Amino acid sequence: MTKKKVIIVGCTHAGIAAIKQILKYYPNTDITVYERHAEISYLSCGTYLHLGGTVKNLDDVFYADPDEFTKQGVKMRLLHDVISIDADKHTILVQDLKTKELIHDDYDKLIMATGSITAIPAISGIENPKVMLCKTCDQAHELYNAAKTHHKIAIVGGGYAGVELAEGYIKSGHAVTIIERGEHLLGQYMDPVMAKKVETLLIEHGVKVLTNTTVTQFDDLKNEQINVKTSQSECAVDMVAIAPGVIPQSDLLAGQVEISKNGAIVTDPYMCTTNPDIFAAGDATEVRYNPTLSSAYIPLASHAVRQGTLAGINVLDKRLRSIGTQATTGMLLFGKTIACTGLTYAKAQEARFDTGVAFYHGNYRPDFMPTTAEITIELVYDKISRKVLGAQMMSDHEVSQSANTISVVIQNGNTIDELAFLDMLFSPNFDEPFNYLNLVAQIAVDQEHGYLRK
């Protein structure tokens, strides 16, 4: 029997996950991987962890070794750039970036795992060498090395990457200003009430926070500083870190498979594109977003790993469907856990839900215990169906797994009534007889005039 040949374009998180599953489920497959970079498996969260001193060696953040895949028979072609794909002919054209040689290759099945690229904002002077990006490992080294001789740093972008960079630079003794054009930080993940708590936490640790502020220009100053001109004012700093969003890398398949308006590749639940021999996974693709029962572009490493796993499992035999996502995220910021899942109130309103919101603020366990900590939770729900739509939480206590619990609640379509009485363990070491997730749901029930009669 002739071996099936699978080509993976991009050894991203999704690509690596796909390789592992193909080796597991289809060990006789001929696998070739093309990757334009010299390294694989860099976790971008390593950038701020390295800046803040948590991770001493940036090389430790790499979690996969291409040599290990080679030993298992995978043809790893690093520093090879795929120039074009001909879906009808099942062929690709590749350039070896070391020799400049052009290579033609063919496949039975192809997995597109090209990931995303930084959405570089159109700001005058952004090409200045003192203005740096923060996505790749090489860029992380640049940010770290530049900070050794630069004290005042501006961060453009108030999403997770920008906020985490701010913490990293504060921990390494720098003066930090974070600039966000939206009304508040973490606008994709948090509503104003919770985001304000994050902003306050940053300010308490010395970060200058500028919101509703758009950067318009970068100019060199005579003292070797760089002037950051904004819609509100201007400031002189030693260097700038850009932490913007990303856009999907789907150009190679343009006109050959269905691509959404935002440029992401459309797939079915098995990660197959509209071409039955091409699969796609990771930051180049859309996800099924369960809170709105629709497709969305939400590039997260957790999504990439799951989608890549599915693509690898299904590439030769469609056997496992995606169950969708709630886009659950979190971070540890100056000792506080911040975690989010599902829709914010604002996004639920945009999606035309009759939206309700409940807040809980209290200790996570009884006051008679030697120590406790306050938790703030925002629970978003639909007033008509009473289904839970999202949650945001923040505490000195570790609440990341509570966000995961709410993710499951949303996944299963549970209501505030069900969450109010959801079975959870009780021990004074961990919580009250009613867990704080029960309690925030009970507040929501009270706001809706009691439990739904059945």
Image (spheres, helix red, strand yellow):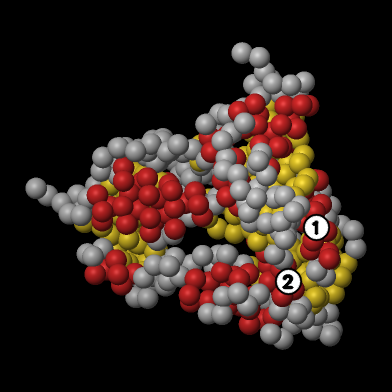
Secondary structure, mark 2, is strand
Secondary structure, mark 1, is helix
- Residue highlighted by disc 2: 240
N-terminal label among 2 and 1: 1
Q: x and y percent of residue 258 in the render?
A: 45, 37
Most distant residue in the right direction: 233
Residue drawn 35% across and 62% down? 34
**Residue nearest the viewer, comparing 390 with 147:** 390
Q: x and y percent of residue 51 in the render?
A: 64, 75
Task: Point out the image quarter for the C terminus.
Answer: top right
Question: Mark 1: which amino acid?
Answer: Glu
| Residue 337 versus residue 229 in the image, above or below | above
Q: x and y percent of residue 62 in the render?
A: 45, 70
Q: Quadrant of residue 136?
A: bottom right
Question: Mark 2: which amino acid?
Answer: Val
Say if residue 119 shows up in the picture.
Answer: no
**Residue nearest the viewer, comparing 29 with 37:** 29
| Left or right placement of residue 298 versus residue 343 in this view | left
- Residue highlighted by disc 1: 199
Q: Label 2 crowding class (10 Å Cα cut-off): few <14, some 14-19, many 20+?
A: many
| Residue 93 versus residue 410 in the image, above or below | below
Most distant residue in the top direction: 454
Residue drawn 87% across and 57% down? 231
Say if residue 30 shows up in the picture.
Answer: yes
Most distant residue in the front direction: 368
| Left or right placement of residue 407 versus residue 354 in this view | left
**Residue nearest the viewer, comparing 117 with 411:** 411
**Residue nearest the viewer, comparing 203 with 257:** 203
Residue drawn 31% across and 46% down? 313
Q: Label 1 crowding class (10 Å Cα cut-off): few <14, some 14-19, many 20+?
A: many
Q: Quadrant of residue 424?
A: top right
